Image: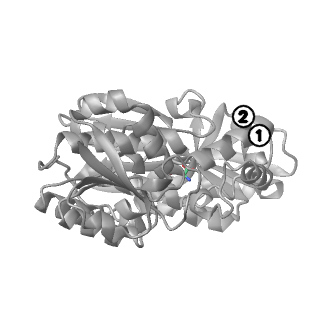
Amino acid sequence: MIQVAVLGYGTVGSGVVEVIEKNKKEINKKSGEELNVKYILDLREFPGDPYENKVVHDVEMILRDPEIKIICETMGGINPAYDFTKRALLSGKSVCTSNKELVAAHGPELIRIAHANQCNYLFEASVGGGIPIIRPLNYSLTAEKIDAITGILNGTTNYILSKMEREGADFETVLKEAQEKGYAERNPEADVEGYDACRKIAILSSLMTGKNVNYEDIYTEGITKITATDFVYAKEMNKTVKLLAQSKEVDGKFYAMVSPFMIGKDHPLAMVNDVFNAVFVHGNMLGDSMYYGRGAGKLPTASAVVSDVVDCARHIGKVIMCFWDDETVKLTGIDEASRKFFVRVAAEKEKEAIAVFGSMAVVEADVAGEFAFVTDAMTEKEFNEKAEKVGIISRIRIEE
Ligand code: HSE
């Protein structure tokens, strides 16, 4: 029997216990041995919970118990998860986590410690919830040189944008409704400002390069400035607006960013709606592949954590390879990235915009007092200079 501990009995942690219990026949068969949740660490008591007798409040009970071989860290945040994880790995206990903040901030160090102690630090649930994406990058696409990853990696913002498109509603209205229904956090900053997607693309970019992509180096822009009017134009252009997290290698230069983009309705990511996530991976031999599913939620995320538990159970005392070195990847600033932009200016600035931007595709829509157009491809730097000269209302990058 393999003894497991769960750190944090919140949404994901309780999901992990539920998945291990509900699917025990399948999970035990695939693990090659029976799994048992011996402890659940939480500060709170859970009177009446079927697992209340497993709840402990002192992490030392878990870290000092030689029977515990696998720990699920579903606490979230850096502290104390970082300390608990490090100590668990140093004592040869594998850790499976959904904690993207910790993985993005300390991934290579924790993987190194795990491997030095003949155990594993696995993090399938940290990106894309229940979608298998870490394992495909680590084990399945090993014959590929992956040169681009583009994802819709945040369910909250995708839900908001999908609803704005469908209902013609403004950002604030939809956010409020999403908060009332419990889809969006009371403090939605990490989601709507793109920080959550930023950490997730940092993790994927690190696995793509095999080196460390620092999330703080990634240009990040959220969806708070996207308006109902942008969707009026998008509809005329047969496009939609999505928050994309991107990572690309072009001629030996690495670019990564999180930003709202206009994408064609025929783009595979345009069909990813509501809380769903998707990751679009380009390999030099395979071409495009896409991974789609529930990017958040109790059971989908817990299922991914438990898939890592099964992997650890199959590899007790053995290292599962993961190429993510400490060496930092130098990202090229987005100033040098070239693309088209959708631009809105006040109607009286039409002539000036034409004079400054030159060749453009005008966008006709039922919006009073504005002139809108799509630029030719140009660098961000060039665009910003021109936009400042004219004085624009807003711009959205275009992904082709
Ligand atoms: N807040 C995240 C989301 C949860 O909305 O996608 C999953 O990481």
Q: Is 78 placed above or below 348 here?
A: below
**Residue 376, horizontal then vertical, whole percent:** 54, 45
**Residue 366, horizontal then vertical, whole percent:** 84, 39
Q: What is the spatial separation of the Cα atoms under label 2 and label 1, in whole angstroms?
A: 5 Å
In the rendered structure, the answer to whether residue 263 lies left or right of residue 214 reads right
Residue occupying the point 32% across, 71% down: 60
Q: Residue 58: which quarter of the image?
A: bottom left
Q: Looking at the image, which is closer to me, 332 or 43?
A: 43
Q: Looking at the image, which is closer to me, 26 or 134?
A: 26
Residue occupying the point 63% across, 58% down: 356
Q: Amino acid at mark 2?
A: Lys
Q: Residue 394: which quarter of the image?
A: bottom right
Q: Which residue is mark 2?
A: 235
Which element is circle 2 on? helix
Residue occupying the point 61% across, 44% down: 158
Q: Looking at the image, which is closer to me, 46 or 96?
A: 46
Of the 4 image quadrants, the one containing the N terminus is top left
Query: Does the beta carbon of the residue at mark 1 sit less than 8 Å from ligand 1?
Result: no
Q: Is residue 339 visible?
A: no
Residue occupying the point 46% across, 55% down: 53
Q: Which residue is mark 1?
A: 232
Q: Amino acid at mark 1?
A: Val
- Residue 331: numbered disc: none
Q: Residues within 10 Å of mark 2 (few under 14, many from 20)?
A: some
Q: Are marks 2 and 1 in contact (CB under 8 Å)?
A: yes
